[in-house]
Image (spheres, rainbow, N blue to C red):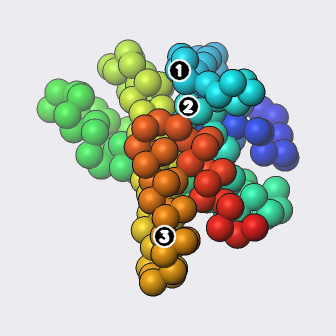
Amino acid sequence: MNTTSTIPQSYIDEYAPPSVSSSAITNTPPAMTNTPAPTITSKSSTATVAGTSEALEDQNIFVMLGVNDGTDEEKESFLDELQQVIWEDFLEYDVKLLITAEEASELQKISTAQYSNDLEKQEKIIVYLEKLIPDLEDIMLEKALELKSDLFFERIAGLREYYNGELDKLQILTTAESLAKSDQWSAASTSLNSLSN
């Protein structure tokens, strides 16, 4: 399995649960064991006149968070962390709602078996869950988008504290928040990033 060292333009056009490569949270996920990589494209019709998509899934997470100047290694590490957060949250909370007690018991056996590394363990879990949950990829995509949105709003909250009392800057934050709530994510990012110009 090849891993690219560059970070794609978009944070997530396609998503796969964690597998061998950390690029799963970017727009070029690796193929999962015995399963082709999912092709989930933006179905959003929100686009600006210039052709820039406003859809959340088309936005670069690093631009949204105002940290686009990191190295490829730093970005890849951050994406790995996000991917792990999504995966652990899914296993801890969502799986219980989606499978039976008997299936959960089998999942527990798979989880506690001995593996040569954590990636092999994740792969076995993914293969098992794909048989039980036909829309697993869609669920993981939704969780990734939810986390992406949450991180953006957390950035706004942090900047509100930082710029407390500076009315002009607080107005920019209010505009960015309003744009994001209206699913105009590109415009919201642009507005927010204007604070650092």
Of the residues tagged 2 and 3, which is closer to the observer?
A: 3
Q: Quadrant of the N terminus?
A: top right
Quick one: label 1, few (<14), some, or many (20+) residues within 10 Å? few
Query: Residue 29, how many percent across, how many down?
Result: 66, 31
- Where does label 3 land, which residue? 170
Residue 101 visible in the current orientation: yes
**Percent x, y of residue 22:** 66, 45
Q: CA distance from mark 2 to mark 3?
A: 24 Å
Around disc 3, counting alpha carbons within 10 Å, would you say few (fewer than 14), some (14 to 19), or many (20 or more)? some
| Circle 2: element type | loop
**Side of 46 relative to 10 (left or right):** left
Query: Dot 2, crowdedness within 10 Å: few (<14), some or many (≥20)?
Result: some
- Tell me: 46 left or right of 133: right
| N-terminal-most mark, 2 or 1 | 1
Q: Residue at x 49, y 64 (%)?
A: 171
The residue under label 2 is: 55
Q: Which residue is mark 1?
A: 44
The C terminus, quarter of image: bottom right
Q: Tell me which amino acid carries mark 1.
A: Ser
**In the displayed structure image, the side of residue 8 where residue 130 appears, left or right:** left
> How much space separates mark 2 and mark 1, taking CA atoms?
6 Å
Query: Mark 3 or mark 1, which has the lower sequence index?
Result: 1
Give, as a three-letter code, the residue at label 3.
Leu
Residue 99 on image: x %, y %: 22, 28
Callouts 2 and 1 close, C-beta under 8 Å: yes
Say which of 172 and 69 sits in front: 172
Res. 17 in view? no
Residue type beneath disc 2: Ala
Residue at (45% x, 53% y) in the render: 177
Is residue 17 placed above or below 5 in the rendered structure? above
Secondary structure under badge 1? loop
